[in-house]
Image (cartoon, rainbow, N blue to C red):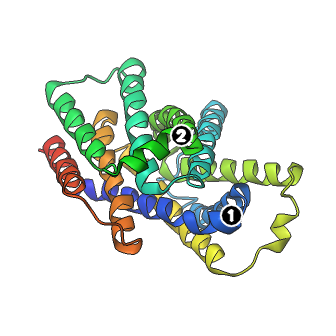
Amino acid sequence: MKIFAVLGYLLCFGISDCLWVYPNKNNPVILSMFIRSVITCVLFIALFLVFENSTIIHTGNLYDILTAILISCVSYGGLYFYVKSLKYEQASVMAPVTTILTSLLALIISIVFFHEILTLKIGCCLLTAFIGVVLCFKPNHKSVDKVKLNKGLALSICASLLWAISYTFFKTPVDKLGVIRFSLILELTILIINLTILAVGKYRMAIFSIKWDQPTLCLIIIGVLIFLGTMLNSYSYKLFPLLYLNVLGKIGVVIPVIYCAVFLKEKLSMMQIGGISILVISAIMILV
């Protein structure tokens, strides 16, 4: 079923978002992103070589490749700001903020640039999904105050803007270049940017101090999850209209919330349980 592609990438991205907290405690953000991108690129290069002569690898022209690189650079900015925001706040708080802002901006872009029609059904599903996301916030007033004052909020707003632009326009290079070639270009661009910043920045010597410890293991797992998630995410653009993906993508908020409840022993309130239920209902509504 087509929905499994969406659920798959949401699960991969959701788990990887939660795992960033461990390498962020010990490594500079840029070093963690570099290690993650090395793992992901190795996997994509291997996949590309396996299917190089297959019909699923589209060639595209120079303009298509340059467009993919530009969109990938914008996506990198979103990734950097989001990972940076996790240094100041937990994923269970930042994920809802980023999700709501990204979705609102992506909604506008989908209608204006891709001329998708906001039907009554899609509008109701989006409204229901937004309510579910809001309810997934921690009801603790101290948490809310902390978000308002924290640098994480400003960083998440930047991430939302860049991700809304890049994720919405992913559809164009995916159609022109195919899932595998575009995904490879995306991850190679992220790797090159990370390597460039490391080479000229103050953390250029940090690469030689990488240890095989828990944070590094987490980054390897994150790299594998991003590899799988990026493939499934790109493929989902061929399966659903952008506005449908906007609704289905809200389910991803559930993963950090459940993660914090299971592994960080945070109690789920009735409001959060209600929010999770509403998100599931909105996803079912859009598919019926």
Between 83 and 219, the one nearer to me in the picture: 83
Q: Which quadrant is home to the N terminus?
A: bottom left
Question: Whole-percent x and y of residue 273?
Answer: 20, 57
Depth order, front residue of 191/44: 191
Depth check: 228 or 61 in front?
228
How many residues crowd around disc 1 within 10 Å: few (fewer than 14), some, or many (20 or more)?
many
Residue 63 in the figure: left or right of residue 11: right
Residue at horizontal 34%, vertical 35%? 242
Q: Quadrant of residue 268?
A: bottom left
Q: Looking at this view, is 52 or 45 the one in front?
A: 45
- Indicate the quadrant where residue 159 lies: top right
Q: Marks 2 and 1: CB-CB under 8 Å?
A: no
Q: What residue is drawn where x is 37% and y is 30%?
A: 104
Identify which amino acid the numbered label 2 is placed on.
Leu
Q: Position of residue 168 (x, y in %)?
A: 45, 34
Specify the quadrant that holds the C terminus.
Answer: top left
Disc with the residue nearer the chain's start (2 vs 1)? 1
Residue 121 in view (yes/no): yes
The amino acid sitting under disc 1 is Val
Q: Is residue 231 visible?
A: no
Which residue matches tag 1? Answer: 38
Q: Position of residue 32 (x, y in %)?
A: 68, 62
Tally the numbered discs. 2
Residue farthest to the front, as pictured: 142
Circle 2 SS class: helix
The circle on residue 168 is none
Vertical position of residue 193 compared to residue 255: above or below: above
Q: Give the residue drawn at x 56%, y 64%.
A: 21
What's the mark number on residue 149?
A: 2
